[in-house]
Image (cartoon, rainbow, N blue to C red):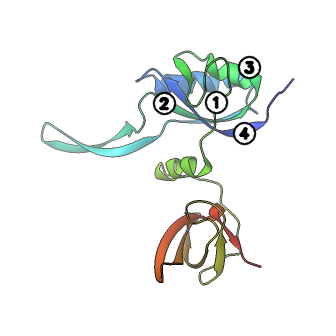
Amino acid sequence: MLDSFDKGWFVLQTYSGYENKVKENLLQRAQTYNMLENILRVEIPTQTVNVEKNGQSKEIEENRFPGYVLVEMVMTDEAWFVVRNTPNVTGFVGSHGNRSKPTPLLEEEIRAILLSMGQTVDIVETNIKAGDVVQIIDGAFMGQEGRVIEIENNKVKIMISMFGSETQAELGLYQIAEIN
């Protein structure tokens, strides 16, 4: 029986240097244990860096978070067990021990990570356009109104009136709402 339907991105802690092996094992175990509908994606955040070796400069892919792997999954007891018992996985980040379920990453955190990797993220559908006045519904400016300057990649630049002057803020589209 499924106890939970918490879909989200979770962070796995692994032995450093074993991230690719964990990804490979996890995808294999998802198939073997018939968990493909619960274990959706496995990602290892990397970045391209320039390294100079023997006077030659070359670009290499480097792990951004050594010892960690991201997994998008539906957090059921069965899926948790399969992932938790994958070889070289030492645990979930955000789990408080004693078999407690971990906390998923916040939507803005995983969006930033995936976009930095060149991955696609869900596009937020909106009718909001430049020049519209919107209500901020999340974050430090919650409750304020602002005028949209620009929208790009689910990010929106807004002018907010603060302390008698205009201030520009960059927010996620999910942090604003149309004013009716």
Foreground mark, 3 or 1, reads: 1
With 55 as the anchor, is 139 left or right in this view?
Answer: right
Q: Nearer the viewer, residue 28 or 11?
A: 11
- Crowding at mark 3 (Cα within 10 Å: few <14, some 14-19, many 20+): few
Which amino acid type corresponds to the residue marked 4 in the rendered image?
Lys
Disc 1 element? loop
Q: Tell me the CA gap for discs 3 and 2.
A: 23 Å
Residue 7: numbered disc: 4
Residue sitting at 60 percent across and 25 percent down? Answer: 96
Q: Is residue 49 above or below residue 130?
A: above
Which residue is tagged 1?
A: 102
**Picture quadrant where residue 93 is located:** top right
Q: Which mark is residue 33?
A: 3
The three-letter amino acid code for the residue at tag 1 is Pro
Q: Residue furthest front?
A: 163
Tell me: residue 112, above or below residue 83: below
Q: Is residue 94 above or below residue 18?
A: below
